[in-house]
Structures are given as structure tokens and as C-alpha cells.
Image (cartoon, rainbow, N blue to C red):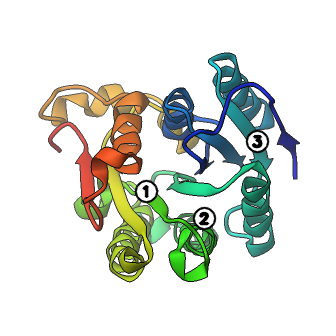
Amino acid sequence: MHTETGTTGTAGRGVVVVTGGGRGIGAATALRLGAAGHALVLGYERDAAAADEVAARVRTAGGAAVTARVDVADEEDVRRLFATAADAGPLTGLVNNAGITGPLGPFAETSPAVMRRVVEVDVLGALLCAREAARAMSTRYGGAGGAIVNVSSGAATLGSPGEYVHYAAAKAALDTLTIGLAKELGPEGVRVNSVQPGLISTGIHAAMGDPGRPARMAPEIPLRRAGEPDEVAAAIAWLLSDEASYTTGAVLRVAGGR
């Protein structure tokens, strides 16, 4: 595991783990949470430089940040991630943001290997991270409470035919996880909510083989544009905040009306 520590700033609002914290929505969320006074543990799988850059920006703004390499589908990696968080202070939040789509294409031409990896990262990874977060924050296990935000997708209700049906199915599972965990962990002081981003301008489109997708699809969005990562980060930050203290089990769509 790669870690980078910083001594600048305070952790007045506790520690938040953000998986996939080096890019896109995760990076935007990290910067917003850091500015709000949360100490951060940014999980990343491959791009250490990107995660380190986000952490450096958090520290430059007066916050505290640690980066940690993690394959969220690997139980031991996830345990080490949350051990790193425990070293940073009391855990108060998890943003389950790590996710992959695999290449765009018809479902019948999607390989089992791609399906398997998408489910491992997007579903199993979220389950493993949520379990560790629950153990750290639940009053049942001696925690002081907290909040989990699962980053789903508008694909969960649209189905994404011809693009990534397997990914849509995985994200639908994440919303079901949100509802179940909210009911189970509510009495133990942990709120659980989900955000469903729509078409957002991030690097995920290039990764799936269609970098021009946001511009091409914008006319199909009622607001006639792709969203920006910070617009999703704002929703995530609100769900983690005290202002959302009576909100749990919610699935909040941030998708420009689509």
C-alpha cells in the first residue's frame, strides 16, 4: 500500500474515506470535504500521482489528507485502507465512489471477464467497504455514528441498453444496498444514502472507449448539458453533513432531469 501523510490542517469533523478519490467525482468530493474540515483518506487503485495531487491540493487549502492504494474487491486491501483511516482519527464517513464500467458495447458481446470485474469492483467492493465502515462507526461496535454515501448511477434505472447493461445492474444493486443498510444501521447511528449521477464530464467516458460521449449525449438531457463533478460532489457533501441529519435511505438523482 502506498500512503502519503500530511501534517497541515485539522480533522475537526472526523475522517472520511473516499474510494476512487484521485479522479472525477471522487476528487471533486475530496476537495469539497477537505475545505469543509474533514480529514481524508483517498483510496485509489492505479494512479498514485493523481491521488497524491488531490491530497496535496487538500493540504494546500489547509486540510489533512492521506492516500492509500486499494483494490476494493480485495478484502485485505480494504482492511488496510480502513486501518489507515483509523490511524488518521475517528471515522465519520465513507464515500463509496470506486467504480468501473468496462468497454461500451452490446450485452451479448460483453465478456464474462468484464462482467465479473465490474461486479467485483462496483458491488463486492462497495459491500466490503461498507462493512468496514459500519464496524468503525456503528454504536453497536463502539463507534460514535457517521454516514455512508454510495455513488450509484442514473444507469440503475435507465438500464443503459447497448452500452453497459451489466454496469447498470451493478449500480442497481448498490441502491438496494443503500436501502437495506439504512434500515439496518439507522438504529446504530449510521445514515446511508445513495447519489445517482447522470451524464457527468469525467475521464470515465474515455476509459470506456467514447471520450466524446458527454457532448454527443447532451441534447438528450433536459438541461441540455453534461454535469460537472463538483455538482455531484455538492450532493455527496450535503448527505454527509449535519444538514442531512434526518435523511437516510434516500436515492438522490443528480442527472439534469434524465
Q: Quadrant of the C terminus?
A: top left
Q: Residue placed at 59% from the left, 35% from the top?
A: 23
Between tags 1 and 2, which lies in front? 1
Q: Real-space Cα distance between discs 1 and 2?
A: 16 Å
Q: Which residue is mark 2?
A: 121
Q: Nearer the viewer, residue 82 or 196?
A: 82
Q: Is residue 173 above or below residue 70?
A: below
Q: Which residue is mark 1?
A: 149
Cβ–Cβ below 8 Å for labels 1 and 3?
no
Can you give x and y, in whole percent of width and height, for residue 76 in the image? 80, 72
Q: Real-space Cα distance between discs 2 and 3?
A: 19 Å
Q: Is residue 67 above or below residue 186?
A: above
Cβ–Cβ below 8 Å for labels 2 and 3?
no
Q: Real-space Cα distance between discs 1 and 3?
A: 19 Å
- The residue carrying pointer 2 sits among few (fewer than 14), some (14 to 19) or many (20 or more) residues within 10 Å by Cα, namely many
Q: Residue placed at 73% from the left, 23% from the top?
A: 56
Mark 1 or mark 3: which comes first in sequence? 3
Amino acid, disc 2: Val
